[in-house]
Image: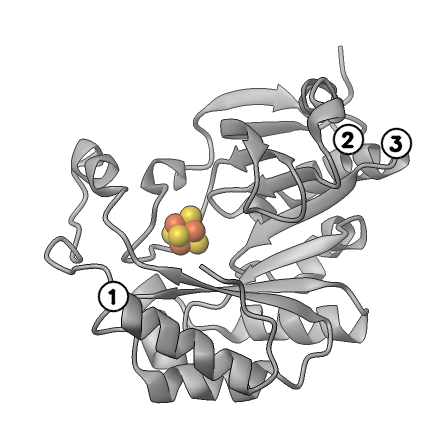
Amino acid sequence: MKDQEEDPVGYLHSVETGGTVDGPGIRYVAFLQGCPLRCLYCHNPDSWKLRAGQKIHASDLVAEALQYRRFMRHGGVTLSGGEPLVQAAFVANVFARLQNVGVHTAVDTAGIIPVEQCRGALDVTDLVILDIKALDPDLCKKVSGSDNTNALAMLAWLAAHDKPVWIRHVVVPGYTDDLDRIEELAVFLRQYKNVQRVDLLRFHQMALHKWDNLDVKYTLRDVDPPPLERMQAARAIMRKHGLPVSAD
Ligand code: SF4
């Protein structure tokens, strides 16, 4: 029997074997169960519950990921979710194994778990993809159910430890599409030299069916994606402040 401390069990939602957006290169992306947030636009509401999905040992997930190693050109493995750092010990174990064999590791997190509780995982993470829901704490609470104290503290910690970060920010009409707020975010982010890229993500309705299947109230049902011109204007603001914003 596998020892839980040496080879912990995680709860897995799903995997994607040829991911190209969740970190550099071609990646094996594992989406983990569990998230304490309730973002209005969540694309994976079926991942909220922690003890659901497939139970898998860290060593087994790593073995599965390594089967795709020859496809991971300039890529690696990303753990996403849900909020993967809810399962910080599992993430730490998986990433330590991967780093041992020279595989690049990335975590896609909303930074909701305090650094003290997930430092072991961050220590073996090569890239942190950090979702900033909103800079204004009240707005952040409105869109995600929690303020951004932990996320901003994590960003500061990552900067102090010189860890590469990609920032993600979802642009939702009526919530986070105000260009003055985007400018405030740009001014805030430009102080962090470890921010290697900023992804402004256009809100979409592709997860609508998941919300309906779960029978959870979905408040953005009648919200359209932001116009492309608004996305371009938002990205131009990031560029104006010297931030390396992705093209789409
Ligand atoms: S942090 Fe991610 S998984 Fe959690 S509610 Fe928000 S969008 Fe969904």
Give the residue at mark 3.
101
Q: How is the image coloured?
A: one colour
**Element type at marker 2?**
loop
Instruction: Name the amino acid, label 2.
Output: Glu
Give the residue at mark 1.
226
Q: Is residue 62 in view from this perspective?
A: no
Cα separation, mark 3 vs mark 1, equals 42 Å
Q: Quadrant of residue 90?
A: top right
Q: Is mark 3 within 8 Å of ligand 1?
A: no
Q: Quadrant of residue 4?
A: top right
Closer to the chain start, of discs 1 and 2, is 2
* Residue 3 placement, left or right of 80: right
Name the foreground residue: 201 vs 128.
201
Instruction: Name the amino acid, label 3.
Output: Val
Circle 1 packing at 10 Å, graded few (<14), some (14-19), many (20+), is some
Cα separation, mark 2 vs mark 3, equals 20 Å
Q: Which mark is residue 5?
A: 2
* Residue 41 placement, left or right of 130: left
Spot occupied by residue 171 in the image (x, y as percentages of width and height): 34, 67
Q: Which of the two discs, 2 and 3, sits closer to the camera?
A: 3
Instruction: Name the amino acid, label 1.
Output: Pro
Residue at the (53%, 36%) spot, across then down: 32
Name the foreground residue: 32 vs 233.
233
* Residue 94 placement, left or right of 129: right
* Residue 220 vertical placement versus 194 (above, below): above
Residue at the (34%, 45%) spot, across then down: 43
* Residue 218 vertical placement versus 6 (above, below): below
Quarter of the image where the N terminus is located: top right
**Element type at marker 3?**
loop
